[in-house]
Every structure is written in structure tokens, then in C-alpha cells.
């Protein structure tokens, strides 16, 4: 993340994303696959770390093996196998959705994970129960804890989509996209950008 100043001198937080070039590695058609989609590959992968099947798949598109392969349905323009798609398909000022895997935060309690308030007061014999969840079960009926109760547990590492982020700048020569705000995931992680 970084920040830019707009024409009014306001400091805008933004994220710089390397978006391309992506290679069309497969064109799905209704006749063969039952649906229409484009498969795009990004980020070159070492040949010795690729399977023979993957190498053959990418060879059809006339490219080397790729680390990240994603399918996009309802692509705006008609593309052929082996075509390059770069950052020039985006325009400054338009809004995009960015999807990625959020940062893993490990095992967390209910206060951090779900925003519980804790027990609150420190009187009436409270002893180290400040961030505890409190009671979780019902009475003698149904004599069990309901499924889906918000409790402590593994937090983060989820598929998250942030919608309607504005494209502030498109740097075509370096394939960079500057997007207002933050996107899910750690530095150098893969994200999927949709118009």
C-alpha cells in the first residue's frame, strides 16, 4: 500500500497491483465445455516444478507454465488462445471488484474474532473473565449448544471480495494498477480483479 495526493491536495490511501500480462491459456465454449469462459494464466513458473500435463496444456497456448490460472465468465471482448491481456483493459476512474485470501491471524478469542464486549464489569467476584464469551448453551431444553454459535477459533485465511474500488491510475508500461483503498491478502499474494 501507498498513498497519492489528488488535485485538491487530499491524501488518498491506495494499493499498487501488478495486473498482467495474462495469457489466454484456454477458451471454454458452450459446445465443448457446456459454458463460455476464458482461462487466464499469470506469473511464469519454473518448468521443473510443473507436471507434464500442465506443460502440455500451456504448450497449446504457446506459453510457459504459469503459477496462477483463473477462469473468467462473460469476458467483454472476444479472445483467442495465446492472446495477451494486459492492464490496458482498465480505465482510470472505473470501479472494480478485488478478490483474494485474507491474512491468516491464527486462533483468536471472541473479542477479536467477533467483536464481543467481554464480561464488562469487574465486580461480583469477576476473576480473569474479562474477554470470555460468557454462557453458550440454552436451558435443560434443548440441552445442547446450537450450531453456528460464534466462538473462539481460527481467524482469517478466508476468500474475501472487496467491491467497488476505484481505479486511480493505470501505468501501462509496467502493468501496474493503482486502486483506492486496501485489498485482501498479504504482500505479493495473488488477487483476482473483475470489472
Image (cartoon, rainbow, N blue to C red):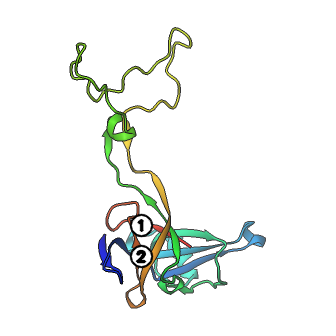
Q: Which residue is painted at 57% across and 80% down in the image?
A: 24
Residue 100 lies, in percent from the top left, at 45, 61
For label 1, the residue is: 190
* Corner quadrant of residue 35: bottom right
Mark 2 touching mark 1, by CB under 8 A? Answer: yes
Q: Residue at x 54, y 75 (%)?
A: 40
Sequence-first tag of 2 and 1:
2
Q: Nearer the viewer, mark 2 or mark 1?
A: 1
Residue 37 as seen in the image, left or right of residue 53? right
The answer to which of 174 and 180 lies nearer the viewer is 180
Looking at the image, can residue 56 be seen? no
- Give the camera-side residue of 130 and 66: 130
Relative placement, left or right, of 115 versus 163 is left
Residue at far bottom of view? 173
Q: Secondary structure at mark 2?
A: strand
Above/below status of 125 relative to 36: above
Where, by quadrant of the figure, is residue 50 drawn? bottom left
Q: Which residue is mark 2?
A: 43
- The residue at 57%/85% (across/down) is 82
Q: Position of residue 23 (x, y in %)?
A: 52, 81
| Residue 137 horizontal/vertical position (percent) | 46, 18
Quadrant including the N terminus: bottom left
Amino acid at each position: 500500500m501507498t498513498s497519492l495526493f489528488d488535485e485538491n491536495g487530499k491524501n488518498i490511501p491506495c494499493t499498487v497491483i501488478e495486473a498482467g500480462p495474462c495469457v489466454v491459456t484456454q477458451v471454454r465454449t458452450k459446445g465443448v465445455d457446456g459454458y463460455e469462459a476464458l482461462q487466464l494464466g499469470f506469473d511464469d513458473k519454473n518448468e521443473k516444478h510443473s507436471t507434464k500435463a500442465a506443460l502440455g496444456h500451456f504448450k497449446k497456448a504457446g506459453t510457459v507454465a504459469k503459477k496462477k490460472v483463473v477462469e473468467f465468465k462473460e469476458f467483454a471482448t472476444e479472445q483467442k488462445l495465446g492472446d495477451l491481456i494486459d492492464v490496458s483493459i482498465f480505465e482510470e476512474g472505473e470501479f472494480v471488484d478485488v478478490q483474494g485470501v485474507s491474512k491468516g491471524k491464527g486462533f483468536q478469542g471472541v473479542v477479536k474474532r467477533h467483536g464481543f464486549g467481554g464480561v464488562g464489569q469487574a465486580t461480583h467476584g469477576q476473576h480473569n473473565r474479562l474477554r470470555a464469551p460468557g454462557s453458550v448453551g440454552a436451558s435443560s431444553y434443548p440441552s445442547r449448544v446450537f450450531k453456528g454459535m460464534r466462538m473462539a477459533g481460527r481467524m482469517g485465511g478466508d476468500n474475501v471480495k472487496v467491491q467497488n474500488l476505484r481505479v486511480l491510475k493505470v501505468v501501462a508500461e509496467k502493468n501496474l494498477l493503482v486502486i483506492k483503498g486496501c485489498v485482501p491478502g498479504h504482500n505479493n499474494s495473488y488477487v483476482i480483479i473483475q470489472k
